[in-house]
């Protein structure tokens, strides 16, 4: 949660610049951030199951490379949909074209970083006797959120300062991605997973457009309560983390033992333990945001409607995560591929609405 404010500082300091010069970025930002966590959260969920089954032994296994290239590739269609929808709303322009190139370059750079981070975060805790389902999804979402917003913003600065070098860098990233595909070993199970993940992500991208459009439409109001833009990445990440943990642990239990595993009281103890954290996380999110906002030169105070509403927001989204994993398993769809992406996307939508409602309340709009 504390590391999430790295993104919050970058977004807060540059929010007005983005809203003015690159408004398309605000439309795709929630979907883009969520997409990274979704893709590699699903990868972590698959790898956890594979670890339990003895299919993966080390970070350099070809299975890891294949899953990584599949994860990056499965995000391409949703990315294009997000960009095209935003461009249609705001108009096709040179700014929109630059945002597209920034998306492509950042997707590959971040994909490489997240791919190996996912393997490390999943494999090593498993070797040490920890349950990857309890820690992998939040850590991956953390890495994704910490690097996604700064990467997007600083790639824009890179283009504005060195446009030719930016174009060359983007081309180099495409070459890296093609090389990664060549090193992969796709089997039938990977093709099935790719279809399921890319299909689900495409649908979810359409849902995320609502979050992005809402964020862009109310950017003027949010910019008047700058603490909310500072807190926005942390809010979405933490709520998504709770939902993804619930979805991941449900998914693994269903894949290993079937639906009878959900009748085990240990499952309910795990969920209850998570729920006990929500008041603490909600208060700390607001408290740290106040300090960070003051640090960058703005006045801020505790927002009690946020602190009181946060636990309820988490409870609803955790319940959704468990439900989605159960329903997908019941209809013979691998919950490892769909539960985390769907749960975190819904969390993003609800979190964005929560932020907008708080902004309207704070500025009296």
Image (cartoon, helix red, strand yellow):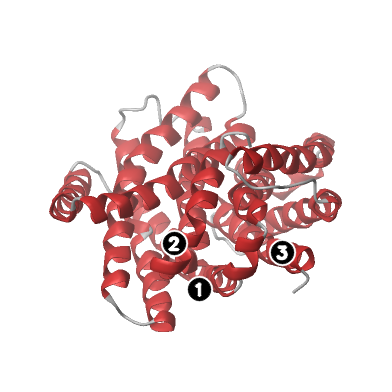
Q: Quick one: label 1, few (<14), some, or many (20+) residues within 10 Å?
A: some
Q: Is residue 30 visible?
A: yes
The residue at the point 31 percent across, 80 percent down is 92
Can you say whether 79 is above or below 272 in the image?
A: below
Specify which label sits upstream in the sequence, 3 or 1.
1
Inter-mark Cα distance, 2 to 1:
22 Å
Nearer the observer, 300 or 77: 300
The x, y position of residue 354, in whole percent, is: 72, 62
**Left-right relation of 153 to 182:** right
Inter-mark Cα distance, 3 to 1:
24 Å
Specify which label sits upstream in the sequence, 2 or 3.
2
Q: Mark 2 points at which residue?
A: 18
Q: Mark 3 points at which residue?
A: 359
Can you say whether 299 is above or below 167 in the image?
A: above
Q: Among all residues in the image, which is located at the extreme top?
A: 128
Q: In which quarter of the image is the C terminus?
A: bottom right
Q: Quadrant of the N terminus?
A: top right
Instruction: State if disc 3 and disc 2 touch (CB < 8 Å).
Output: no
Front tag of 2 and 1:
2
The x, y position of residue 142, in whole percent, is: 54, 39
Q: Quick one: label 3, few (<14), some, or many (20+) residues within 10 Å?
A: many
**Left-right relation of 214 to 102:** right
Q: Name the residue under label 1.
A: 206
């Amino acid at each position: 949660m504390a590391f999430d404010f790295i993104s919050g500082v970058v977004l807060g300091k540059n929010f007005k610049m983005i809203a003015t010069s690159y408004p398309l970025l605000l439309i795709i930002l929630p979907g883009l951030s969520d997409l990274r966590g979704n893709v590699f959260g699903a990868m972590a969920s698959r790898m956890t199951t594979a670890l339990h089954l003895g299919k993966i032994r080390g970070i350099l296994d070809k299975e890891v490379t294949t899953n990584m290239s599949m994860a990056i590739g499965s995000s391409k269609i949703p990315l294009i949909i997000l960009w095209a929808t935003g461009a249609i709303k705001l108009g096709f322009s040179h700014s929109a074209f630059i945002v597209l190139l920034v998306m492509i370059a950042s997707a590959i750079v971040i994909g490489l970083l997240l791919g190996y981070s996912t393997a490390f975060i999943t494999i090593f805790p498993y070797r040490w006797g920890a349950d990857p389902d309890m820690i992998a999804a939040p850590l991956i979402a953390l890495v994704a959120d910490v690097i996604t917003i700064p990467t997007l913003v600083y790639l824009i600065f890179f283009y504005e300062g060195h446009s030719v070098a930016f174009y060359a860098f983007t081309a180099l990233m495409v070459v890296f991605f093609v090389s990664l595909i060549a090193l992969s070993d796709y089997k039938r199970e990977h093709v099935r997973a790719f279809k399921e993940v890319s299909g689900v992500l495409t649908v979810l991208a359409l849902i995320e457009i609502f979050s992005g459009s809402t964020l862009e439409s109310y950017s003027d109001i949010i910019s008047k309560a700058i603490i909310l833009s500072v807190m926005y990445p942390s809010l979405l990440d933490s709520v998504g983390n709770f939902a993804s943990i619930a979805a991941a642990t449900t998914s693994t239990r269903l894949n290993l033992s079937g639906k009878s595993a959900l009748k085990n009281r240990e499952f309910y103890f795990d969920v209850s333990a998570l729920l006990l954290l929500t008041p603490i996380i909600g208060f700390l999110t607001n408290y740290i945001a106040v300090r960070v906002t003051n640090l960058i030169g703005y006045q801020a105070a505790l927002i009690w409607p946020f602190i009181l509403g946060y636990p309820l927001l988490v409870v609803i989204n955790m319940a959704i995560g468990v439900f989605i994993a159960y329903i997908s398993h019941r209809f013979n769809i691998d919950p490892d591929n769909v539960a985390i992406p769907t749960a975190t996307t819904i969390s993003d939508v609800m979190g964005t609405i929560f932020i907008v409602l708080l902004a309207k309340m704070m500025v009296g709009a």
